[in-house]
Image: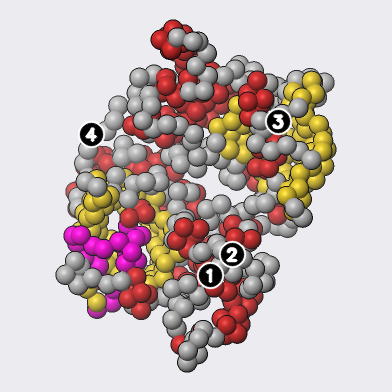
Amino acid sequence: MGGQSAPPPSIEPAIELKAISKSFGPVKANQNVDLKVLPGTIHGIIGENGAGKSTLMSILYGFYEADSGEILINGQKRKIHSSRDAISFGIGMVHQHFMLVETFTVLENVMLGAEGAPLLNKSSQSAREELLKLSKEYSLAVDPDAMTGDLPVGLQQRVEILKALYRGAEILILDEPTGVLTPQETDQLFKILDILRSRGVSIILITHKLQEIMAITDRVSVMRAGTMVSERETAETNKNELAELMVGRKVLLEVDKTDANPSEILLEAKNLSYSEDGVKKLDDVSLTLKAGEIVGIAGVSGNGQTELLAALSGICPLQTGSIKIGSVKIDSDNPKTPKEFRDLSVGHVPEDRHRMGMVTAFNAQESAIMGFHDDAAYNGKFLMDNKAVEQHCVRLMKDYDVRPEDPKLKSANFSGGNQQKLVLAREMDRHPKVLLVGQPTRGVDIGAIEYIHKNLIAMRDAGSAILVVSVELEEIMSLSDRILVMFEGRIVGEVDAKEADARQLGLLMGNAGAQTEAASSENNSNNIHSEEIPA
């Protein structure tokens, strides 16, 4: 359990933060936070949304300056006013969303901002030599001349790590590093982190995935409400204890559900294909959703899941193929608007709640009726009935535990978890026959995840058909009754959730298992496309 044994406390910390405080107006993001990271260790930091993790790391990397407190690097007190200062002190950061120029080569990305020599050719040659040396030393093999945008996300992440090492990083901050990786890519990343640790690099790992904390870290610090509430040796704790420390109460980590009892087909999609700017986003996709079941869509982000949800909710007009909802058939000759899909009892929780699920400048009661704002219940003879809208929002907030219970508060001022609960409440409260949910717990803390899963299971048991798209493989495996895997716009496999395991799904997500699956099940040849298995 956990990583290597941590060095004895007598060793000088690589990083020591003392009484760090930071406020944004009345919000105290960090309050007297202490943290020690020992050299050559992997130190995890966990906490709910708004716990202060990102603010603390932003202070260490120079994005923010602390209002008070001290930063010591290898025992020396340092003032960090910018990321340039942090880099000069040997600190590197790999962001959740990669900071790469896709039209640059790997070498050009690594050099960017650190060219070093007046003559670029000379600088380029020395950079190439250094890059090859680092790649070999840390098992970060990547082609220096490859176009970065053509690389899979796992290799792009290697480029980010190489960028930091090229700049002399001896302390590496990783922010949610596995969010877009397959299980196999995650395993490879952990092997790389293990090598970095063995070479003396100190690593801070910010993640909400407790299984990753247990798998790779040496120590873990827990933050709650801007304070550091606990620190544990990873080998001496477990996921349940850490979850309770994060939330302040016991949390059910496993999805509590009985077996599904699927009945009639409520939605059937046949041969859906969709292209955008000459690129095929959906490629002959067929699926069924039955009453009383949850179907999960697994896959690395960007493999057609977004377009599938858009097609099934009426946002994306059908180019080829058809959708049947009840007795109503929808195709390019008989299109329907998103409102007409809603009228057919299809609810939709978008993947991006900020861009599509709400208007953050609207107050909560306005976001709570988006898409339903022309209902008679919210409108008088000439004007909107604001009192009715407010009362409706108050009820939703009580029923779905949205905090704070303030319908007049701007949507932007709720935490990510409460924004998500508000969007889910709006869609689920209508008891749709079909519910499409994109990334139900993206950016959501453990307490809210537990609540969202519980409500989705209750809706399934009440007879709805639910389609869940998530990049969180553990969520797909625990929440779903059936799992479909998408790769490059196609459904390349279907697995009974009871029989699914992460390795099997990970292979399908990378399409490495497609040929094997097709050979063993010729009857499913429409769902699984044979391809050469990559070496």
Is-magenta flag for residue 163?
A: no
Q: CA distance from mark 2 to mark 3?
A: 32 Å
| Tag 3 residue | 81
Residue 422 is left or right of residue 36, and the answer is: left
Give the image location of residue 500, x and y in percent: 41, 49
Give the class, few, some or many, for how many residues have Cα within 10 Å of label 1's Cα (few <14, many ≥20).
many
The reply to whether the C-beta atoms of the residues labelled 2 and 1 are less than 8 Å apart is yes
Query: Which residue range is magenta in the image?
Result: 308-327
Residue, x 60% and y 46% (percent of image)?
208
Amino acid found under the numbered disc labelled 2: Ser
Q: Choose mark 3 or mark 1, whichever is in front.
A: 3
Amino acid found under the numbered disc labelled 4: Glu
Q: CA distance from mark 3 to mark 1?
A: 39 Å
Q: Choose mark 4 or mark 2, whichever is in front.
A: 2
Amino acid found under the numbered disc labelled 3: His
Residue, x 59% and y 77% (percent of image)?
393
Q: Which mark is residue 196?
A: none
Residue, x 58% and y 44% (percent of image)?
209
